[in-house]
Every structure is written in C-alpha cells, then in structure tokens.
Image (cartoon, coloured by chain):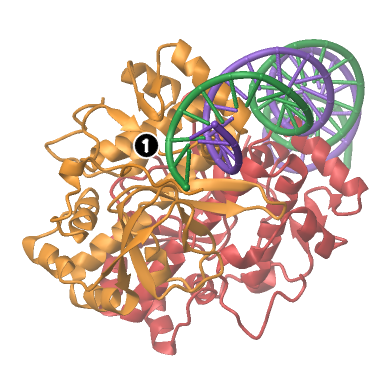
Chain colours: A orange, B red, C purple, D green
Amino acid sequence: MISRSRPICGRDSLNTPEQHPLQLLIRKLETHYPLSDHDRQAILGLPYKRRHLEAQSYTVREGARPDRCAVLISGYAFRHKVTGNGDRQFVSINTPGEALDLQNLFLDESDHNVQMLTRGEVAEIPQHALEELVLSEPNVSRAVMVSTLVEAPIFREWALNIGRRDSRSRIAHLLCEFAYRLTMQGLEPSGDFELPITQEQLADATGLTAVHVNRVLKGLQSEGLLDRNRRVVSFPDWHRLREVGDFNPRYLHAIHTSEPARTLS
Amino acid sequence: MISRSRPICGRDSLNTPEQHPLQLLIRKLETHYPLSDHDRQAILGLPYKRRHLEAQSYTVREGARPDRCAVLISGYAFRHKVTGNGDRQFVSINTPGEALDLQNLFLDESDHNVQMLTRGEVAEIPQHALEELVLSEPNVSRAVMVSTLVEAPIFREWALNIGRRDSRSRIAHLLCEFAYRLTMQGLEPSGDFELPITQEQLADATGLTAVHVNRVLKGLQSEGLLDRNRRVVSFPDWHRLREVGDFNPRYLHAIHTSEPARTLS
DNA sequence: CGTACGTTTGATCTTTCTCAATAATGGTGG
DNA sequence: CCACCATTATTGAGAAAGATCAAACGTACG
C-alpha cells in the first residue's frame, strides 16, 4: 500500500545522515536572507525531534493549532485545500529545508492542510523554542519572517498560473518552478529530477484532470521539451520550456548570489 | 475617461473627513490581533501623507522597490499579476484600512502590481517610520506581521476557488468574501453593497471571461441569490449564497469578537 | 505471481471561450 | 439641461479546451 522502496529526493551526498538536519533549514533561509555564523549556531542549537513520515501522512491539518513546527529534512510535502465537494487543489509544494508551519507561529488555526507527497523525514521543533529564538535573535527573526512571507508570492503566481494559462503553459510553469527551486537550494544539481508526483497530483496542482495532464505531458515530450523515464524527468531545452511556461523566477525572491542556478538558465 | 462622480465606498458616517485616517488601519489590525491603547496611540503618531488616487492608478508595480507604505483610506484596490501574453489575474482585493505594501518591508522587489479599483485615498507612511515603530513596539510589530501574513490564506483560497470550483460557485464565493470582509471591518453595515467592480474585473478575479461572468450573474439573480441594481447588490438569501459559494470564512482569520458579522450569517 | 495503483488511450460530452453585434449607462462638454 | 462618447453590460451563435467515462495496460511491492 505504501511505498517502501529506495529513498526519494535529496542526492545522498547532500543529505547524509551525519549532517545536522537543521543545516538544510539554514540553507533555505539563506536563499532569501543572509545569516551570520552566530545566527547559524543559534539555529543549530534548537531542540528538535527527528521523525519519519509516510507518504500521504499529514503534518498540518486545517483547523488544527500546532504546537511544534516541522522542518522538512527529506522527501517532499504539499499544501492543499479541499472544496466542499471534495475536489482538491495544491497551493504549493515544499522541498527539503522548508518549514511547514511557520505561519502558525503568528496565526491561530491552520487554514489548509500540509501532507507528505513522498515519504520522508521532518525535524519537529517545539514552537516555544522557536519563539524564544526569534525573540532573542533579531536577525534570525527577520530571516524567519522573510522565509514565511516568501511563500505568499508563490500562491499568487499559482493563482495566475491556474487562472490564466492554458494547460500546456500551466504544466510547463510548474515544472520550471520545481526545477528552479531545487537548483536554487543546491539540491539535485545533476539536471534531471525525480518528479515525486503522480499525474493525478500534478492535476491537483494545476487545476486540471489526471487524464488531461497525461496528454499534455505526452505533448511536451513529443515537442522535445521534456524527457521522461519513469518518474525521472529532464529538460532537453530549458530555455524553451521556460518560455512555454511563461516562467519568470522573480516571484521566488531568491537572493542574488555569485552562484546562480548552474544547471539551469 | 476617468470617473469623477460621487465618492465610492465607505459610508460617509464611517469615513468622515474629521476621523484620523490611520484609525481605519487600527480597525483592520484589530480584526486580527488585539491592540492596547498605547499601541493605538503609537500608530496614530505615525507621519503620513494623504493622497488622492484615480481609478486604475498604480500604487505598487511589479519590480519596484517602494520606500513608503500606502494604507487605503477610501476606495478599493486590487493586487494582480499579468502573464506574458497579457492576461490578467487578480489575486486579492483590498478594502479601506488595509496596508497595500507591507510585504515590501521585508522583501526586496515587488512581485506583483497593486492598482486602484476605484478612485480613493491612501495615507502614505515612510517605510523608515514604520520600521522604527515596529522596532520599538513589539506588540504593534506582531500585529503588523499578523496582518501581513493573513493575506496569504486569501491567495490560497483564491487558488482553490479558481482551480477547483465551477463558475457559479466561484463567483458566489468571491461575493461572499467581499461582503464578509467589509462587514468584518464594520464597513457597509446596511446589507447591500456597492460592488466597485466591472464584470470584466470580476472575470479577472475569477479566471473567467466577462461574457461568462455576465451570464453567471444573471443566473444567480434568477435563482434569487443576488439582487442587482446598477452596481449595488444585495443577497436575499445569504445562507444559500454561502452554500453555493462553498464559503467558509475560516481562512480570513478574523478574531472572534462579541460582535460577529451582524448583517450576515 | 497477483493486486493495487498509476498510466495511457479512445470516444463523447460540457463548460467556458470567442467573436460579433446591440443596448445601456454614466460622464463630459456645450 | 441636453447631446455625445466611451465604457460597460447583454445577447446569440459557434468553437474549443478540457472534463468525463470507460477500458486496457504497466509496474512495483507484498
């Protein structure tokens, strides 16, 4: 019933057991806001509990009031909402290093669900520890605030994507975002990606049906914009895919470093 | 070319010239987070410049780096993004009292546009003044963060609305949100609303076309869910409209006060 | 090896879009 | 106050994108 095969996501070399799990969080924060050594140490000092999660398991449920904040260490998660008649819409996908419920540091009840896309691990940090850190370290506070805020532009871009692009652009855009974000965080530097997502989930992310997604995917492939081999994809013509997807990464608010996405662009 | 007729939005009784403009901001902040008298005074002490804006004028442009933060005093604004081929998608509508570019306190470049829906007024606060206030008043800081963060759920709900509801529900949902938010802030307590939006704009907000919006509106009207008289609408059967729109206000994160939306629900 | 899940394909149907024309409105200038 | 103009609303007919239904095919895991 539940997939138990090889580890998914995060090249082993980048995600070895001996690395401190919160290192990934630091890397993520730093894609949006610079941190000092001191800040990094403070973050590494946070208490946390490591936890394995199966695919489909929830980390946050609509209506819940979490008392801890999970940081994704390996695997992928997705945020979604469900309509009254059961249709589901993804509103973003989370990659390793991202905090899954930071907004609940400030808001009361969760207004959406977060669920594991694949199986993986999280580091659970007690909210009070996080709050204390944020109070005592203004720079970390700022970084946390920025990394929380920086998801809103993704929701906005998704609204645009779903509302105003046709199915081909829509899917291309999603692929671009996914690839770009992984590269931005230094994950998956090889140029091909294990797409951790079924076509049905891809449909839920784009507001389409699984059947249609399948046809569009085939179309992109026959156009030479996409190579698929099982769940591993690569983009033979990144430039054109980006055009088709009408993809402009500005909304991701990545800090401009000396090391731009190497394998892309 | 540009509308110059009577003032739009905000019953005069609620928005008299003699009222301090930032009072509206305070009211908005308090719908999400409690403020003390001290906090309120601190906010009222902010420097600001009052400014009239015509309909369609921009207050924030994608790519810009604003050095001031505009608070809407009267009239409505909308956030939107545009695709490469010119299609437009609204991602939220702002009502009086709301700050239009708080996120730029934390992020570099704006990733979307904010434009006036109607003509109206804003109070422009220099960013540095806002930053100082936020540094010296932790409770105000918290309130500002909450009110910034509280827009993200709206984007998520819109993504769901656009991606997974049919045109009828979609429009009903938008109407519900608009009515609910106004009521929540104590604006428009009379039960009917001046909808400050053309059908074309309604289309851009819902990911539909103007023609289709027109037909759906007629449908809702013939079902007895909507009364239209010019731009003034009322909802003869709020309960049913809410059902049709699959509207659950949880995502608006309104504080629970002793005064729930009086004229609604 | 079989079962459950995911993918692929075909045929048909529906919603929504497009194009185009007409009718109202509200604001403007005279 | 009235006539004119630009914008917005309304309507119809036809087209298209994407949904739905149903079936067959793969493949991974147990």
From the viewer's side, name the closer residue of B83 and A254.
A254
Residue B66: x percent and y percent? 33, 50
For residue A107, above or below residue A165: below
In which image quadrant can residue A142 be found?
Answer: bottom left
Residue ID at (77%, 44%): B168
Residue A157: x percent and y percent? 46, 40
Q: Which amino acid is tagged 1? A: Phe
Residue ID at (18%, 29%): A262
For residue A116, above or below residue B17: above
Q: Is residue A166 visible?
A: no
- Check the image and name the residue furthest to the left: A37
The reply, left or right, for residue A185 in relation to residue A93 is left
In which image quadrant can residue A174 be found?
Answer: top left
For residue A206, above or below residue A145: above
Quadrant in which the N terminus of chain B is drawn:
top right
Residue ID at (44%, 51%): A55
Residue A3: x percent and y percent? 43, 45
From the viewer's side, name the closer residue of B177 and B130.
B177
Q: Is residue B211 visible?
A: yes
Residue ID at (48%, 74%): A65
The reply, left or right, for residue A132 in relation to residue B27 is left
From the viewer's side, name the closer residue of A96 and B10.
A96
In the rendered image, which residue does mark 1 sit on? A178
For residue A180, above or below residue B125: above
- Check the image and name the residue furthest to the bottom: B37
Label 1 chain ID: A
Residue density around tag 1, few if under 14, some if 14–19, many if 20 or more, within 10 Å: some
From the viewer's side, name the closer residue of A200 and D15.
A200
Residue A94: x percent and y percent? 38, 49
Secondary structure, mark 1, is helix
The reply, left or right, for residue B195 in relation to residue A170 is right
